[in-house]
Image (tube, helix red, strand yellow):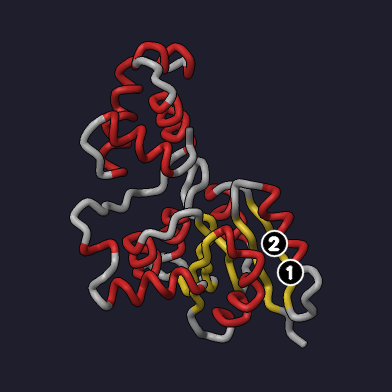
Amino acid sequence: MKKIKVHIADDHKILIDGISAVLKIQEDIEIVGCSLDGAQTIEWFEENTADVLVLDISMPNVNGIEVMQSFQKKRVIPNIIILSSYDEMKLIREVLKIGAKGFLTKKCAGEHIVEAIRSVNSGKQYFSESIQKKMVDFLSGAGEENNPESTFFSPLTEREKEVLKLIGNELSTKEIAEKLFISVNTVETHRKKLMKKLGVKNVVGLVIYAMKNRII
């Protein structure tokens, strides 16, 4: 029996270990590689191949969307299952547009990962139930895209998360600069990028987002 070759890319080793434990007991699946950031993923695929890539969106150095974009010039592209903490409809649409075959939230990955791998490897698409509901709501006109306040953002970098956390903890721009050993101008640039990515108009909006997403 030909095994399905899988590569796992996620910046949390504990999540890789958890998925690996589930996959290793499957007779038809073989883990052929793992990477902890997007740059490592791209480098691995320069020399190797896999049938399925389980790909985190938010990773340091190079994020998951950039990894997918790097595949667009390759002749052989793996079947990609997105693994993300985010489930906004705009993200789902974006990754589908550039080649993803499946989408799972991290909280349900262990429950659905095996079925998802088998499905995308056979040429089908796979979405967890919560993602399916979002897609149905969107198509029926009840989804977040009809809310003018709903704005999807590109995945936050690790530095942006650090800055957002410190903003949420009420540190001043100067204090953040000193704590992260960067200039005040760099902090201001990060703050402006965060507001643009998250679709908020001020620091209060940043703090609310950070609280809702348990960054602070």
Other residues around mark 2 within 10 Å, as few (<14) / some (14–19) / many (≥20): some
- State the SS at label 1: helix
Name the residue at 47% across, 69% down: 130
In the displayed structure, 156 sits above or below 186; it is below
Q: Nearer the viewer, residue 141 or 7?
A: 141
Residue 167 point in image, percent of width and height = 38, 25
Identify the image quadrant of residue 21: bottom right
- State the SS at label 2: helix
Q: Nearer the viewer, residue 77 or 34?
A: 34
Amino acid beneath label 1: Leu
Name the residue at 52% across, 46% down: 59
Residue behind mark 1: 23
Q: Is residue 87 left or right of residue 190?
A: right
Residue 140 point in image, percent of width and height = 26, 78
Name the residue at 29% across, 67% down: 143
The quarter of the picture where the N terminus appears is bottom right
Q: Is residue 60 left or right of residue 6?
A: left
Residue behind mark 2: 19
Name the residue at 52% across, 61% down: 105
**Mark pair 1, 2: CA separation:** 6 Å
In the displayed structure, 160 sits above or below 18; it is above
Q: Nearer the viewer, residue 37 or 209?
A: 209
Identify the image quadrant of residue 171: top left
In the displayed structure, 195 sits above or below 168; it is below
Q: Is residue 158 left or right of residue 149?
A: right
Residue 23 point in image, percent of width and height = 74, 69
Q: Nearer the viewer, residue 191 or 39?
A: 191
Amino acid beneath label 2: Ile
Q: Are marks 1 and 2 in contact (CB under 8 Å)?
A: yes
Tell me, yes or no, if residue 92 can be seen here: yes
